[in-house]
Amino acid sequence: MLTDPPYFISQEIVIHRSMNPQKYKYVGKDINLDFGEWDKFESEEDYRHFCQSWIEKVAIILKEGGHFVTFFDQNRTSYLIEDARSYGMAMRQHLYWLKTNPVPRARKVDFMVALEHACWFTKGSKSGATFNYQLGQQQNYVSAPIPGHTLADDGERSHPTQKPFKVLAVWINYLSNADDIILDPFLGSGTTCYCAKKLNRYSIGIEIEEKYCEIAARRCSQEVMELV
């Protein structure tokens, strides 16, 4: 399973950088910190309950030796690890997407955020679990630009938290085999299913917002190009 759930980090804030060039060192597009209703919860307790609920369901359907990789807010990974372990999934490693073009900081007070965090778990014993070491040594990070900039497989960015094809492809290649089934219960714009199709895996995607279902369907119906 490979997914990217809500982080509960949305804020009803838009930073208008072009309106005050003296205040912001970088002048570019405005920054909207409101990702959508799907990332909003009543409280931290409500969000924790939501996470416990979907992680439990993942544990139930995941086969023994199956892998569970999920992006997650780096400040809340303790929640994720505690819950996953309580449902019989062993923590394996922290994985990272290294953004080659991180969003410049609007205010001159901190560093650009160039790392996106994910956790890798295996249900039950890792003995016999798939890890395609024959592909060679691989760092626990993959470098790629934010979707919508340079990689053809990502196309136009159609989701505010869309993840790069290149990153998912590495993890799918190492942690699954051809004809395996990849589940993504927070499908968004469909990158997981699109990637699985190109790598000769089957996939199941779940998404509640109709507009993203349509985008994912269009992406996955495209002719599968040669992986480069």
Image (spheres, rainbow, N blue to C red):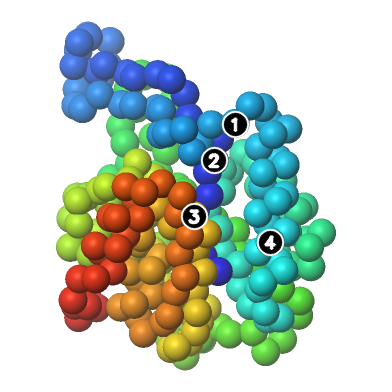
Q: Which mark is residue 7?
A: 2
In space, the residues marked 1 and 4 are separated at their CA atoms by: 20 Å
Q: Secondary structure at mark 4?
A: helix
Q: Amino acid at mark 1?
A: Phe
The residue shown at (71%, 81%) is 64
Q: Amino acid at mark 3?
A: Phe
The residue shown at (41%, 72%) is 170
Q: Is residue 24 above or below residue 39?
A: above
- Residue farthest to the right, as pictured: 86
Q: Position of residue 68 (x, y in %)?
A: 60, 67
Give the foreground label among 2 and 3. Answer: 3
In depth, the one of 21 and 216 nearer the eye is 216
In depth, the one of 112 and 63 nearer the eye is 63
Circle 4 Cα neighbour tier, 10 Å, few/some/many (<14 / 14–19 / ≥20): few
Q: Which residue is mark 3?
A: 186
Ranked by sequence position, the earlier of labels 2 and 1 is: 2
Q: Which residue is mark 4?
A: 57
Q: Secondary structure at mark 1?
A: loop
Q: Which residue is mark 1?
A: 41
Q: Amino acid at mark 2?
A: Tyr
